[in-house]
Amino acid sequence: MPMLKTPNPPIIKTSNTSLLKTKNIYIDTQAFVANNYFQSENLKRLSEFGKSGVVKIFMTEITRHEIIHNAANDLMNAIQDLNEFKKKFANKGKILKNIEEFKPYLDLPKIEFDSQLDKITIDLNSFLTEANIEFIPYHTADLTDIVTKYFEQSKPFGQGKKKHEFPDAIVLSSIEHWCKTSNQKIYMISGDNDMFETRSSTILTVKSLKDILSLINSQNDTDKRKYWIQSVFEKHEEVIKQVISEAFEEKLVNETGYDLELEDIEIDDLELHDYSTVLDKVKNGETVLQLDYDISFSARITYDDYSYAFFNKESNKPFGSTQNDVRKTFTFTQTAEITFQTTLDEKGYENAAKVFINCSYTSVPLAEDLIDKLDGYYYRPS
């Protein structure tokens, strides 16, 4: 974990455009799905702001049902993928039964769909309670306006009208009605392009949880604090790249599928995007920044090549693969969280002498993203 010294920053002026325009925040279904539901640290951070009254969080029953529906689909797909993995592993990896360390992988438990979905529902209800979420009634939606938008192909329907967008249209209409009757505005968190691009004088759209958290933290931080964060980020950009590279390489090796072997990973280039301050606990000396970054890397990959395999009708599987060993270069955009841990003196963060910087999280490409570039990975009948 690199330790860095930072200078005392001067006071600067910031624009009011970074301030919250309203304390009201609506969370769309997509925000839960994109953040893996309730494992998301950003959802937990937003919940804390709702619990403390810093912001007021809203939802509709339609969104609540959509979250459960999406979770059920994701759970079913995960169960199917796990069962396929267990079958494939049992067939191709029998030798591993002789190795003690691999027994947990061979004895993966059966996932019960109903009980696991019940747990997800309980987690959702707990989140709603802890974050003090209020429900906007959806029966106030203007159905005449919704149907008109459907036939005009205006947002959230867009090209092709997309009948499945009716729930989104009802949600938007309900929110607009609430805003007008309460004479308030509201932020809506949604990465859905049709929802995000909807034009409204009362609904302020933001694409991600990190964006709204950055706005909330900017509201609470002083100008001097904002400059301090910015100065640490800019002055130590190379160290930040270093800790991201190390975390990326370690996680990529650990999480790549068992039928791919990655070695000799080299980071060729890494470019940082703008950051969002998703957590800033001055008293605890902890600041967390979330940002996207572009990374280009090469790696030596060993895998089964089916380029010259043939199909075995008896086993209903391809036969005659060869092991291929190639070096490939990849470029992806990933997301990372950078933590600044500050050792404070008696004068507070303004005179902080030491900052420890580490990468607390990074996403990595899925195995599917890698194998798309591997010749012969898939069996293709001639």
Image: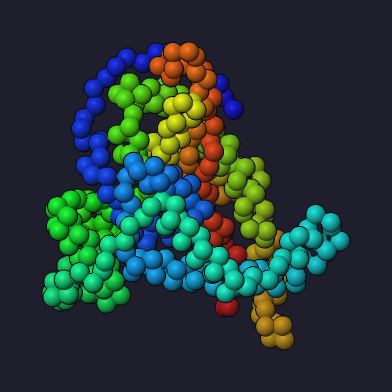
Q: Nearer the viewer, residue 17 or 362?
A: 17
Q: Residue furthest bottom?
A: 314
Nearer to the camera, 337 or 243: 337
Q: Which quadrant of the rendered structure holds the C terminus? A: bottom right
Task: Write down the quadrant of residue 84 in the picture.
Answer: bottom right
Picture quadrant where residue 45 is located: top left
Residue 381 place in picture, x, y as percent? 58, 78
Can the viewer see residue 319 in this picture? Answer: yes
Query: Residue drawn 34% across and 41% down?
Result: 54
Indicate the quadrant where residue 308 lies. bottom right
Q: Measured along the vertical axis of the image, is residue 83 above or below residue 35?
A: below
Q: Position of residue 227 (x, y in %)?
A: 34, 23
Residue 220 appears left or right of 117:
left
Q: Residue at x 48, y 35 (%)?
A: 338
Q: Does the image show residue 273?
A: no
Q: How many marks?
A: 0
What scheme was used to colour the molecule?
rainbow
User: Where does the image place residue 135, in percent across and percent down from the top left?
Assistant: 31, 61
From the viewer's perspective, tell me whether residue 304 is left or right of residue 292: right
Q: Is residue 175 left or right of residue 287?
A: left
Q: Position of residue 290 (x, y in %)?
A: 43, 40
Quadrant into which the N terminus falls: top right
Q: In the rendered view, would you say 219 is above or below 45?
A: above
Residue visible at 36% across and 16% down in the picture: 9
Is 222 on the left or on the right of 32, as rendered? left
Which residue is rendered at x = 48% and y = 57% of the image?
126
